[in-house]
Structure formats: structure tokens, C-alpha cells
Image: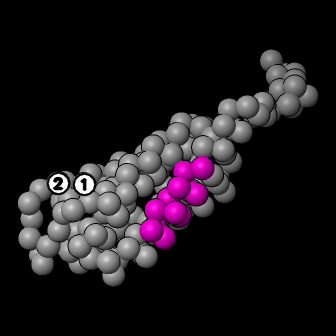
Amino acid sequence: MVKQDNYRDNLYLLLCRIKLIRDTLTLDMDPEIFFDITLDDIEFIHKNLGNMLKKLRENNQLIDREELFSHFSELEWQFSGVLSEILNGSGGISAVKNPEIKEKITFYRKNSLERRETSEAIGKSAIDSPKEPVMTANELNELLKDL
């Protein structure tokens, strides 16, 4: 059986996880409970955004490719914003209060910005490039010659 990726659902679920992290940073939570799991979630999102961009880049046949790259870019913007909040924030999960996470969060943010730039460039080039016909005029004529 051929595995089919549902990019929209994957993007949506990653966005939900990003929003959960943002809520965790906003609420007055106990960092002893949520610190490690939040960092694990950030690593999970980072890893899977990289994998998803790779798959999107390789799949030139997607019908709504430009739209997916636009959604991906927005998701990266959201992720980068959360990482900036961690770097500059004063909550229980922040690089200000926990300098040991600063290097890792900075790395993730840099990669997020690079992925966003890449997705925007690919999405823009997909819009600007002419669509190849699914079938040539000769192939269409051959198929219709007996009708």
C-alpha cells in the first residue's frame, strides 16, 4: 500500500502543538511540571517541520502546492514567534531564567527562519512558473481520434 501524506492535517496538528506551547508560556504554570515536555514538544515540532519541508519540496505533483507552502510559511512564522518568546520572555520557560536552553532555542529559531525563507521562495517560484499540461495536445488528439 502506498503511503499518502495528508499535509493539511499534519500542518494543522503542528499548529495546535505550537499554540499549546504559546499557552504554556502565557499561563502561570509550574515549570517543574512543564519544562521538559515543552522542550520535547519544541524539538518534535522542529524535527517534523524539517521533514515536512523536505517532502513538500520533493513532491512537485501536488495540486495545491503553492497554498501548502503558504500555510507552511505561516506555521514557521508562528513557531519562530514562540521561540522568540522563549528567548526574550520572563515566564517559567525562558532562556532568561534558564540560560542552558538559549543555544538550542536560538538554533531552532535560526532553522525555522531558514525553512520559512525556503518555503516562501519555493511557493513564489511555483506561482511564477507556468503549469505544465497534464497531457500534450498530440496525446489528447490521439485519445480523441476514435470519437
Residue 70 in the image: above or below residue 77 = above
Amino acid type of the residue tagged 2 in the rendering: Thr
Magenta-tinted stretch:
106-117
For the question of whether residue 9 can be seen, the reply is no
Q: Could you say which is closer to the camera, residue 36 or residue 85? A: 85
At x 60%, y 61%, the residue is 54
Q: Where is mark 1, residue-wise?
A: 22
Image coordinates for residue 55, horizontal then vertical, percent: 58, 59
Callout 2 crowding tier (Cα within 10 Å): few <14, some 14–19, many ≥20? some
Q: Where is mark 2, residue-wise?
A: 26
Amino acid type of the residue tagged 1 in the rendering: Arg
What secondary structure is the magenta-colored segment mainly? helix
Q: Could you say which is closer to the camera, residue 27 or residue 4? A: 27
Image coordinates for residue 80, horizontal then vertical, percent: 42, 55
Q: Is residue 109 magenta?
A: yes
User: What distance separates the C-alpha of mark 2 from that of mark 1?
Assistant: 6 Å
**Are dots 2 and 1 in contact, CB under 8 Å?**
yes
Where residue 30 sits, quadrant-wise, is: bottom left
At x 71%, y 39%, the residue is 125
For the question of whether residue 138 can be seen, the reply is yes
At x 17%, y 68%, the residue is 92
Residue 133 in the image: above or below residue 18 = above
Q: Is residue 58 magenta?
A: no
